[in-house]
Image (cartoon, rainbow, N blue to C red):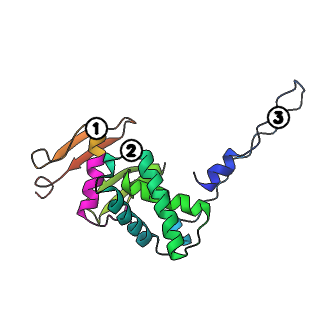
Amino acid sequence: MLLVDKLNKGRLPEKPDNGGDVTSPPPPPPLGVKPQSIASRIPNVERIKKTIHEQLIASLGFNSDNHKREDVLKRIGELVDQYCDDTKLKLTKFDRDELCELIIDDVLGLGLLEGLLADPEVSEIMVNGPKTIFIERRGRITQSQLAFDNETQLRQVTDRIVARLGCRVAESCPIVDARLQDGSRVNVVTPPVAGQ
């Protein structure tokens, strides 16, 4: 949860109406402060994520999907704490939690796509390979600066998306066209079709 959300959630409830003629003023709008990105607060955050992810693989194995979510979350928290202790990296609880969330997104979620999916202004995400991601925001298509590390990382995210649909992508079935539970449409096209 972002700090802005915590602040908005912590507002006092309105006073109950006592039947008087005095109407209470409308509640103030939610705070519009956008927090700094974690990359601006923690130097080398991508390298740190990668190091902790590698340590997680070493302790749990390559397929974290085979483990209980709670076990993976607990282990990530332990590894983040251990990394901070070993490297003398001083992080606030908020930054540690956000770092854990980023690693969880990579390990159990859809990696760098999670931030785009959470953005209400993004109406479409188009991934044309690990280094080429386009987004439509407020009706305008632009190329994102986000990129997957490699084809394997992109394939893991693709497999997670289609697994939620009860499908899988393979050479024998290189096209998936379906809808997620929230109504979002998913189109996946892989080689050999994508290469044509």
**Neighbourhood count class around disc 3 (C-alpha, 10 Å): few under 14, some 14–19, many 20 upward:** few
Q: Gap in Å between the C-alphas at discs 2 and 3?
A: 44 Å
49 vs 179, nearest the viewer: 49
Q: Residue at x 44, y 55 (%)?
A: 75
Q: Position of residue 43 (x, y in %)?
A: 51, 75
Front-lying residue, 140 or 112 = 112
In this figure, which residue is indicated by the disc labeled 2? 68
Q: x%, y% of residue 25?
A: 81, 39
Where is residue 155, by image quadrant? bottom left
Residue 147 screen position, x and y as percent:
34, 65
Magenta region, residue range: 143-160
Q: What residue does disc 3 label?
A: 15
For image coordinates 46% across by 70% down, the residue present is: 45
- 2 or 1: mark nearer the eye: 2
Dot 1 corresponds to which residue?
A: 165
Residue at 75% of width from left, 41% of height from top? Answer: 27
- Which callout, 1 or 3, points at the residue further toward the start of the chain? 3
